[in-house]
């Protein structure tokens, strides 16, 4: 559904966040995004009004259960899933760990799992750990020149014993978006399942896990303007089959059976605040808001993406003009194929020395391996740069003025 005005009203957007957010030009959004007031209010309301164990009949308890279920249902809708296909856990790292333990119980020694060297370690290490149970682990490496995951390389790895392929929808380093649908189709044709890390994708594009035909899909809600919890989607049929990780008497409770213990109550309830945020943006920007929450969020994401693309283009132009800068990844200027996350090194400079130089201008960027050291090694980021990259990651609430501030400060520093 097209918006009447195709551009995001940044004053309106930023007015939905606490004022102190805007003291700094913040470009470490891939680490964790800002949280709008609507989420903060929901956490506070839950704790103020419903600070009891949910699930009993008395008023506060019934209300607490309703709030938790509502938060979970809305996040399921946001990604195109059913409410009972979504598990809210403490982090994606923990969710993958739990999933790996559960699926490990369904595989037999000699079965194979394919992992990449592109992903955040969250979607690698837990799977590699299954080698201890006799599973074969095969690596799907990126093209070392481009940083791209190539489907032709995967073809050579898929075989009769492949049970699972784990990959990311988008890299948290090079920002490139992988064709998750095509990869999933290829994996399904080979008779295996997919576990997709969507953490770096979800804050930038609308998502439909059913359209992707994903078996398992992970995202971290604290990077999607929410509180510090993460979501694991699993197809209902898989949830029915996986061994329970919770108490034995909860083995028929879907999705609760997969998660040892329950979700964080106040944060799960406060996920409704993410929905409030999208609704506020839809109400403000869309002339004729579509009928469903999912369609409204899709329309809002379209506005976000186009604003982010404009910001990214300006920054990419700057980085590309610097002869002493090496950008990682090949799709640097291709906004269709990437999110506004840029990683780069400066010739002859340890990366860690750059961010402090920007702080006097109140510009925050990231530096490190961002838990993807296998990718940095594959792309040849070495001692000269501390085995670390500089990362600028934007969100839809960043402004052109902030990007100009970033460019001016970086230009001086490098
Ligand atoms: C792409 C990607 N996957 C997974 C994770 C891990 O998420 P969590 O902190 O929820 O464990 C991160 C965190 O930065 C990430 O960027």
Image (cartoon, rainbow, N blue to C red):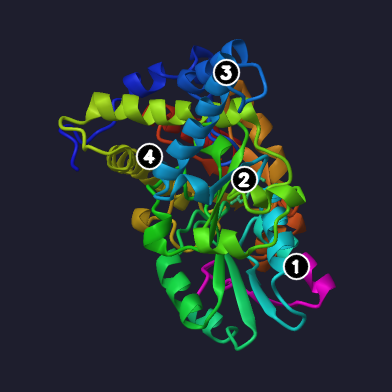
Label 4 CB less than 8 angstroms from ligand 1: no
Q: Nearer the viewer, mark 1 or mark 2?
A: 1
Q: Position of residue 273 (x, y in %)?
A: 46, 26
Q: Is residue 390 left or right of residue 301?
A: right
Q: Is residue 233 left or right of residue 209?
A: right
Q: Compared with residue 320, is residue 145 higher up or lower down, i.e. above or below? A: below
Distance from disc 2 to disc 3, alpha carbons, whole Å, reads: 38 Å
**Crowd class of label 2 (few under 14; some 14 to 19; many from 20; radius 10 Å):** many
Judging by the rendered image, the residue that carries numbered circle 1 is 128
Query: Which element type, helix, strand or loop, lies under badge 1?
Result: helix
Q: If you read the primary sequence from the N terminus, does the residue marked by circle 4 or circle 3 appear first?
A: 3
Q: Quadrant of the C terminus?
A: top right
**Crowd class of label 1 (few under 14; some 14 to 19; many from 20; radius 10 Å):** some
Judging by the rendered image, the residue that carries numbered circle 4 is 311
Residue 390's label in the rendered image is 2
Residue 325's label in the rendered image is none
Distance from disc 3 to disc 1, alpha carbons, whole Å, reads: 39 Å
């Amino acid at each position: 559904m097209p918006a009447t005005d195709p551009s995001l009203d940044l004053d309106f957007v930023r007015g939905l966040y606490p004022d102190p957010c805007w003291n700094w030009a913040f470009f470490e959004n891939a680490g964790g995004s800002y949280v709008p007031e609507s989420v903060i209010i929901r956490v506070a309301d839950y704790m103020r009004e419903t600070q009891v164990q949910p699930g009993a009949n008395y008023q506060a308890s019934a209300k607490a259960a309703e709030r938790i279920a509502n938060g979970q249902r809305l996040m399921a809708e946001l990604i195109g899933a059913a409410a009972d296909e979504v598990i809210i856990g403490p982090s994606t790292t923990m969710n993958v760990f739990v999933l790996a333990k559960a699926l490990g119980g369904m595989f037999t020694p000699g079965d194979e799992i394919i992992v990449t060297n592109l992903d955040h370690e969250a979607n690698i290490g837990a799977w590699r750990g299954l080698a201890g149970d006799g599973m074969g682990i095969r690596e799907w490496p990126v093209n070392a020149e481009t940083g791209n995951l190539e489907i032709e390389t995967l073809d050579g790895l898929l075989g009769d014993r492949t049970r699972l392929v784990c990959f990311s929808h988008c890299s948290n380093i090079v920002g490139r978006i992988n064709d998750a649908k095509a990869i999933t189709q290829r994996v399904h044709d080979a008779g295996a399942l997919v576990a997709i890390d969507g953490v770096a994708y979800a804050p930038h594009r609308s998502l439909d896990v059913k359209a992707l035909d994903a078996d398992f899909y992970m995202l971290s809600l604290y990077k999607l303007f929410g509180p510090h919890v993460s979501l694991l989607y699993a197809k209902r049929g898989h949830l029915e089959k996986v061994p329970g990780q919770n108490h034995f008497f909860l083995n028929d409770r879907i999705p609760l059976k997969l998660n040892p213990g329950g979700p964080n109550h106040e944060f799960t309830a406060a996920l409704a605040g993410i929905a409030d945020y999208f609704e506020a943006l839809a109400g403000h920007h869309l002339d004729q808001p579509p009928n469903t929450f999912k369609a409204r969020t899709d329309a809002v994401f379209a506005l976000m993406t186009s604003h982010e693309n404009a910001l990214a283009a300006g920054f990419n132009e700057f980085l590309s003009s610097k002869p002493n800068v090496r950008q990682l990844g090949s799709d640097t200027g291709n906004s269709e194929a990437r999110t506004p996350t840029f990683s780069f090194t400066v010739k002859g400079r340890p990366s860690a020395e750059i961010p402090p130089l920007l702080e006097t201008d109140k510009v925050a960027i990231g530096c490190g391996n961002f838990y993807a050291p296998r990718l940095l090694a594959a792309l040849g980021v070495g001692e000269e740069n501390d085995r670390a990259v500089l990362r600028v990651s934007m969100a839809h609430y960043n402004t052109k003025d902030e990007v100009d501030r970033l460019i001016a400060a970086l230009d001086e520093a490098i």
